[in-house]
Amino acid sequence: MTPLLWIVVKMGIVTWLALLLASLMRAQGWTPPGFLLALGNRDNMPAPSAVAGRATRASVNTLEAFVLFAPLALVAHAVAAANPQVLLGAQIFFWSRLVYLAVYVAGIAYVRTLVWGAGYAGLVMMILGLG
């Protein structure tokens, strides 16, 4: 597997874990009632705590970003354009998303936006590297 495809796989895992963590935090799945709630239809979910709300928003944003990242990486791989610029952009995107998740859940507002911008700069690098 190429380094670029490996980043796609890792980003998919990170996205899934972020969604899972947010869901467990919202349902308080580590408690017996929360575990039963998480196993059910989730019709009567409690209001999220501030941290659980941030985890949910961060996970949804990560899913949206992954939807933008994956096609770029797969196209670069398919057309053999996985050059150093594309790979560096993908690495910047991946590591920025990890930091973004931590910073968002921690509630560090302005840093969160800077890290988000760094991740999208990685996407722009990937786009420019395709040409």
Image (spheres, rainbow, N blue to C red):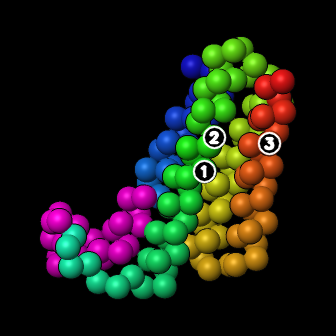
Residue under label 2, please give it.
69
Q: Secondary structure at mark 3?
A: helix
Q: Residue at x 42, y 67 (%)?
A: 22
- Confirm whether residue 120 shows in the render: yes
Question: Which mark is first along the chain, 3 or 2?
Answer: 2
Q: Residue at x 39, y 82 (%)?
A: 48
Q: Secondary structure at mark 2?
A: helix
The residue type indicated by label 2 comes to: Phe
Is 69 magenta? The answer is: no
For the residues labelled 2 and 3, the Cα–Cα distance comes to 10 Å
Residue under label 1, please give it.
65
Q: Secondary structure at mark 1?
A: helix
For the residues labelled 1 and 3, the Cα–Cα distance comes to 12 Å
Is 25 magenta? The answer is: yes
User: Residue 120, how many percent across, how many down?
Assistant: 74, 51
Residue 109 shown left or right of residue 60 in the figure: right
Q: Which mark is residue 124?
A: 3
The residue type indicated by label 1 comes to: Ala
| Magenta segment boundaries in residue numbering | 19-41
